[in-house]
Image: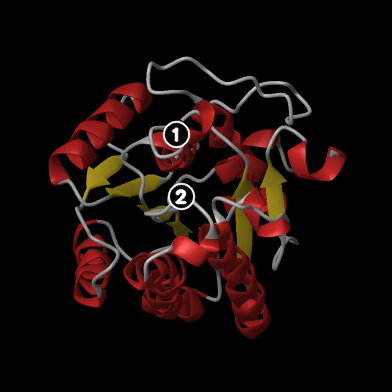
């Protein structure tokens, strides 16, 4: 009989995570490490990555996280990230593409071309690049998991975050295509679509300049998410518990999209 530990355990797995030194990405990486995986913590600032890795290792009671800095906007840095992961840990079993940007808030008519390009390049093209850098590892083993962080914004219009939402909708198409192409190789590809979580990245959306929290009236649970609430989600998507799930978009937003 398969027990809960077998269903959700990730011991022996190597996970590469981007945008994982703080916020939602950190919580996703924490979940994988707590489930037994060895995890690469990656973002632009090495010192922040290193501190997060040390905190995770302390939490787990052993070394399960390592820090490798990378700016996802540069293809050569992404390749270096994959190469160093190979050197330090081995071939990648699990990839979480969480890093992304949102450089502009406002109507789409006012977004500068540079901000539009940066949003699409960071939120879509970099995911395409990194997925195809790790897919050879997964094809060789005929096993692997890719999780791309999209957003519940991919399912609804926004007058202030329109291009961001466009990029996240494009990520859903990327997920579907990769799932179709690599499903025959037993590689599962899914999208995680969070709502509004209380992170520094999204702070302008959930609090004012003085730190006063806005009311969550449009969220069914009447509160914004805490990053730690994503730990179990990453474990589910990466583990045998979700072994027949691919090409899907899992919305975690307190019921905002489905109930409104």
**Residue located 27% across and 33% down the image:** 52
Q: Residues within 10 Å of mark 1 (few under 14, many from 20)?
A: some
Could you tell me which residue is drawn at 39 percent across and 55 percent down? 101
**How many C-alpha atoms fall within 10 Å of the one at disc 2: few (<14), some, or many (≥20)?**
some
173 lies left or right of 145: right
109, above or below 106, in the image: below
Residue 253 seen in the figure? yes
Residue 34 in sight in this render: no
Q: Is residue 250 left or right of residue 171?
A: right
Q: Residue at x 48, y 41 (%)?
A: 28
Colour scheme of the picture = secondary structure
- Dot 1 or dot 2, earlier in sequence: 2
Residue 98 x %, y %: 44, 53
**Which residue carries the number 1 mark?**
204
Q: Along the line of sight, which residue is nearer the eye, 34 or 246?
A: 246
Q: Quadrant of residue 15?
A: bottom left
Q: Is residue 82 above or below residue 239?
A: below
Q: Which residue is mark 2?
A: 105
Q: Are marks 1 and 2 in contact (CB under 8 Å)?
A: yes
Residue 241: % across, % down: 70, 48
| Quarter of the image where the C terminus is located | top right
Please, which residue is most extreme toward the right here? 259
Position of 80 with respect to 258 (left or right) is left
Q: Secondary structure at mark 2?
A: loop
Figure quadrant of the N terminus: top right
Helix, strand, or loop for circle 1? helix
As measured in the structure, the alpha-carbon distance from the residue carrying label 1 to the one carrying label 2 is: 10 Å
Seen in the picture, residue 144 relative to 31 is either above or below; the reply is: below
- In this rendered view, identify the residue nearer to me: 24 or 115: 115
Left or right of residue 200, residue 42 in this image:
left
Number of on-image labels: 2
């Amino acid at each position: 009989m398969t027990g809960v530990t077998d269903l959700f355990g990730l011991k022996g797995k190597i996970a590469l995570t981007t945008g994982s030194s703080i916020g939602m990405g950190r919580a996703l990486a924490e979940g994988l490490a707590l489930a037994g995986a060895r995890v690469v913590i990656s973002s632009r600032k090495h010192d922040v990555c290193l501190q997060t890795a040390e905190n995770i290792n302390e939490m787990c009671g052993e070394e399960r996280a390592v820090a490798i800095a990378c700016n996802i906007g540069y293809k050569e840095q992404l390749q270096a990230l994959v190469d160093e992961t190979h050197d330090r840990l081995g071939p990648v079993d699990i990839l979480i593409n969480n890093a992304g940007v949102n450089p502009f808030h406002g109507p789409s008519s006012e977004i500068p071309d540079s901000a539009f390009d940066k949003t699409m390049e960071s939120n879509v093209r970099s995911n395409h690049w990194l997925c195809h850098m790790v897919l050879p590892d997964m094809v060789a083993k005929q096993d692997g998991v890719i999780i791309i962080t999209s957003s519940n914004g991919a399912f609804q219009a926004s007058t202030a975050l329109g291009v961001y939402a466009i990029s996240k909708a494009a990520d859903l198409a990327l997920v579907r295509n990769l799932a179709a192409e690599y499903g025959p190789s037993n590689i599962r590809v899914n999208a995680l679509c969070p709502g509004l979580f209380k992170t520094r990245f999204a702070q302008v959306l959930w609090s004012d300049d003085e730190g006063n929290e806005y009311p969550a009236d449009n969220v069914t649970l009447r509160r914004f998410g805490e990053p730690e609430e994503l730990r179990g989600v990453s474990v589910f998507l990466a583990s045998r518990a979700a072994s027949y799930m691919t090409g899907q978009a899992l919305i975690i937003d307190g019921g905002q999209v489905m109930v409104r």
